[in-house]
Amino acid sequence: MATLNVDATSSSSPAALPGVSRFHHTPCYCEENVYLLCKKLSEDGIAKSDGSDLYVVFISNEKKQIPLWHQKASPRADGVILWDYHVICVQKRKDSNLPHLVWDLDSSLPFPSPLATYVAETIRPSFQLFSEFQRFFRIVHAPVFLRSFASDRRHMKDSAGNWISPPPSYEVIIAEDGTDHNLNEYMEMSSANVVKSIGPDTIDAVLNQKLGVLVSESHLEEFFSKIS
């Protein structure tokens, strides 16, 4: 995950939930941060032990230019930044009366934040963007992601093989089937692959397919309102 030149674009946390410091965070490696976050939420009993109430959401677009607000890496007062991609975790609450939560280790919003708050403050769908900055969201069920995701961090090296940003100290993540790198598959997004509506087939695909489904920002909250 790298930043781009942003000038190209036109409530408190629940007390029982842990703070950011409880989670491993390496700047610019949001996909790995979320991978470890999902594991810890499950291990610590904050999520279901199998992670079935967690969803990994990749945010990007065809041009790899997505504006998000309230990001710690931004030098601006409003926290807006252009990422090439970003990854967050969304948790469906055990109590259906409670709001879904967004776990974003790079956000300056309360951690975690209700999904509706995060969408309004970080994604800002009411903010008029040029078409090249429209965001797409790849939703993947966490249990599938934890089995299938792999990264050898090649995307964080320049043409000379030097690190663009220092890598995590732990070993690279390898998928259960032995795959050593497939991050690019999660990051690749095309408007042609965005689902037109949210129905049972969409939910089934998220629960069972390695790459989940691709939705527009207008369908993001709707998807989470329909999962049981």
Image: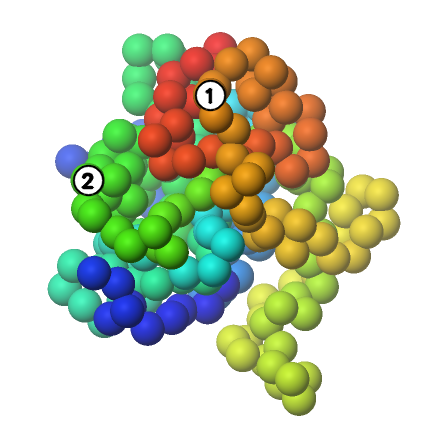
Q: Which residue is mark 2?
A: 126
Within 10 Å of disc 1 (Cα), the crowding (few <14, some 14-19, many 20+) is: some
Q: Specify whether residue 218 is in view.
A: yes
The residue closer to the viewer here, 225 or 54, is: 225
Give the residue type at disc 1: Ser
- Quadrant housing residue 121: top left
Give the residue type that dot 2 points to.
Ser
Q: Position of residue 122 (x, y in %)?
A: 27, 46
Residue 197 tag number: 1
Q: Residue at x 59, y 51 (%)?
A: 188
Query: Compared to 215, does 135 lie above or below?
Result: below
Determine the secondary structure under disc 1. loop
| Residue at 21%, 48% in the rendered image | 128
Residue toward you, 185 or 153: 185
Does 133 sit above or below residue 51?
below
Mark positioned earlier in the residue sequence (1 or 2): 2
For the point 26% across and 63% down, the residue is: 9
Q: Secondary structure at mark 2?
A: loop
Residue at the right extreme, as displayed:
178
Mark 2 crowd level (few <14, some 14–19, many ≥20, 10 Å Cα): few
Indicate left or right for 138 with 158 as reference. left
Q: Residue at the spot x=85%, y=43% of the render?
A: 177
Closer to us: 8 or 224: 8
